[in-house]
């Protein structure tokens, strides 16, 4: 622009001089013009050059200042708000287009931001950890679960090797970048994760995305299932072996006639134990699956405890155990049959694992608005390291005594599942050789409007 203004001014000055000469020449006499024109032009050459030089200088200065004056308002236009300081009317159409384009860009940016926020909200609320790796094998995006898993609030820009250096993880990621879907397992912070990699092919190369799913509960459940299957097989095999042994002796005629009633009694005892074990397994499976059809009804705990004590009194007397009930009437919502079995198992265990001339005290009461049942014995107690395991299936504190008493090893596991079904809390306090106290604390019952 500056050059155009400069040449415009200079050419204008030159044309003015030329026009002046052209206008003067016609009025001069022809003879004079013929005689004097060469001399006149020769004398005027210096002046013309001087005037031309001045015209060049003035043109340059004028071009510089005119350019700045013209361009200043244009340079001061705010692209985001082009009409705040309008420059010239001639620019209105350009400013209108600029304004429309700016509005369109702002709308597109708003849509992109909204979609990004929506994407982040969705991924951050996923139960799985999700990480997107770019073609350079570095993190493009990671959700909240991924940041928790890899112990960092900022993962973007890190390579997958920086996330985890375990061989199986690196191999699975490498396979994904080679175009193959892959999986691996991780152990982090005492929990198990299944990680699946999926390659993403594009014209620019291969990227990938991987998900890490917490399978701790599933892995523990599978472990418990395997242990349960192994324990069930062992527990069923023991009485069946005894039954088959005694039956073979009788069948082969090896047993003396006077021993047959004794063998028959042992077969009957083992059969009863086998039946009790099967019933407990079926019952526990029903509790596990939630396959309990009965509805909850008000159950009076004190009266329930009285019936349990009445059933177990002969067993307690035969072992020299004092079995007593204390407390007051309390009512909870539940399934009477299950609550009866729960209390029966607690009292039966307290008798079986007690010492001669010991005692079992059952209390029914209320604490902080919650009904509770407590069973206190003076038995062998439980070691601290075993207290967290006594509610596991087939776990026995004293295996030899459990065999003698005919226990199935499922009593306390049934107690635990029954308490969970009723929303109750179990607390255990025990000291070796001093006794055990188990408290079942039922949830507060909301009063119905009368």
Image (cartoon, grey):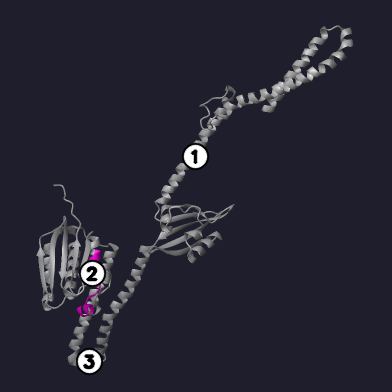
Residue that mark 2 sits on: 412
Callout 3: 10 Å neighbours few (<14), some, many (20+)?
A: some
- Which of the two residues, 74 or 166, is positioned nearer the viewer here? 74
Mark 2 touches mark 1? (CB < 8 Å): no
Image-based side of 393 in relation to 206, left or right: left
Q: Is residue 304 visible?
A: no
Residue at left offset 20%, top offset 71%: 431
Q: Quadrant of the N terminus?
A: top right
Q: Residue 29's spot in the image, x, y percent?
A: 86, 6
Q: Nearer the viewer, residue 412 or 144?
A: 144
Residue in the image at 58% along x and 27% along y: 72
**Label 2, label 3: how many angstroms apart (C-alpha)?**
39 Å
Looking at the image, tell me whether mark 3 or mark 1 is earlier in sequence order: 1
**Count of marks placed on residues:** 3
The residue at 19%/90% (across/down) is 259
Q: Main secondary structure of the magenta part?
A: helix
For the point 19% across and 63% down, the residue is: 440
Residue stretch rendered in magenta on the structure: 401-417
Q: Which residue is mark 3?
A: 255
> Please, is residue 48 above or below residue 204 in the view?
above
The residue carrying pointer 2 sits among few (fewer than 14), some (14 to 19) or many (20 or more) residues within 10 Å by Cα, namely many
Which of the two marks, 3 or 1, is nearer to us in this view? 1
**Residue corresponding to mark 1:** 109
């Amino acid at each position: 622009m500056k050059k155009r203004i400069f040449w415009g001014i200079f050419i204008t000055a030159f044309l003015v001089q030329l026009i002046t000469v052209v206008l003067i020449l016609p009025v001069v006499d022809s003879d004079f013009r013929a005689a004097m024109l060469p001399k006149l032009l020769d004398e005027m050459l210096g002046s013309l050059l001087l005037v031309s030089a001045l015209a060049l200088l003035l043109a340059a200065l004028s071009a510089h200042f005119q350019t700045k004056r013209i361009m200043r308002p244009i340079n001061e236009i705010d692209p985001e708000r082009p009409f705040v300081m309008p420059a010239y009317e001639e620019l209105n159409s350009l400013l209108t287009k600029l304004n429309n384009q700016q509005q369109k860009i702002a709308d597109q940016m708003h849509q992109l931001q909204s979609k990004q926020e929506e994407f982040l909200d969705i991924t951050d609320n996923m139960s799985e950890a999700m990480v997107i790796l770019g073609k350079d094998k570095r993190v493009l995006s990671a959700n909240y679960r991924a940041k928790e898993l890899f112990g960092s609030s900022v993962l973007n820009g890190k390579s997958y090797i920086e996330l985890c250096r375990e061989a199986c993880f690196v191999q699975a990621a490498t396979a994904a970048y080679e175009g193959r879907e892959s999986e691996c397992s991780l152990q982090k912070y005492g929990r198990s994760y299944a990680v699946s990699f999926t390659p993403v092919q594009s014209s620019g190369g291969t990227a990938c995305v991987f998900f890490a799913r917490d399978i701790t509960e599933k892995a523990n459940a599978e472990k418990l299932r395997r242990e349960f299957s192994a324990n069930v097989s062992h527990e069923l095999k023991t009485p069946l072996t005894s039954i088959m042994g005694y039956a073979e002796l009788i069948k082969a005629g090896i047993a003396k006639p006077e021993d047959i009633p004794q063998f028959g009694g042992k077969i009957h005892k083992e059969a009863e134990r086998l039946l009790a074990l099967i019933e407990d397994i079926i019952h526990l499976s029903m509790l596990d699956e939630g396959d309990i059809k009965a509805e909850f009804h008000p159950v009076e705990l004190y009266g329930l405890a009285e019936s349990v004590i009445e059933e177990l009194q002969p067993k307690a007397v035969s072992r020299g155990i004092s079995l007593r009930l204390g407390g007051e009437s309390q009512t909870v919502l539940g399934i009477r049959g299950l609550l009866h079995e729960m209390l029966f198992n607690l009292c039966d265990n307290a008798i079986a694992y007690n010492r001669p001339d010991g005692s079992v005290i059952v209390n029914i009461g209320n604490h902080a608005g919650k009904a509770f049942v407590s069973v206190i014995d003076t038995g062998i107690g439980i070691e601290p390291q075993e207290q967290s395991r006594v509610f596991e299936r087939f776990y026995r504190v004293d295996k030899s005594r459990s065999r003698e008493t005919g226990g199935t090893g499922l009593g306390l596991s049934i107690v635990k599942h029954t308490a969970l079904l009723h929303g109750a809390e179990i607390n255990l306090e025990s000291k070796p050789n001093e006794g055990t106290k188990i408290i079942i604390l039922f949830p507060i019952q909301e009063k119905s409007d009368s």
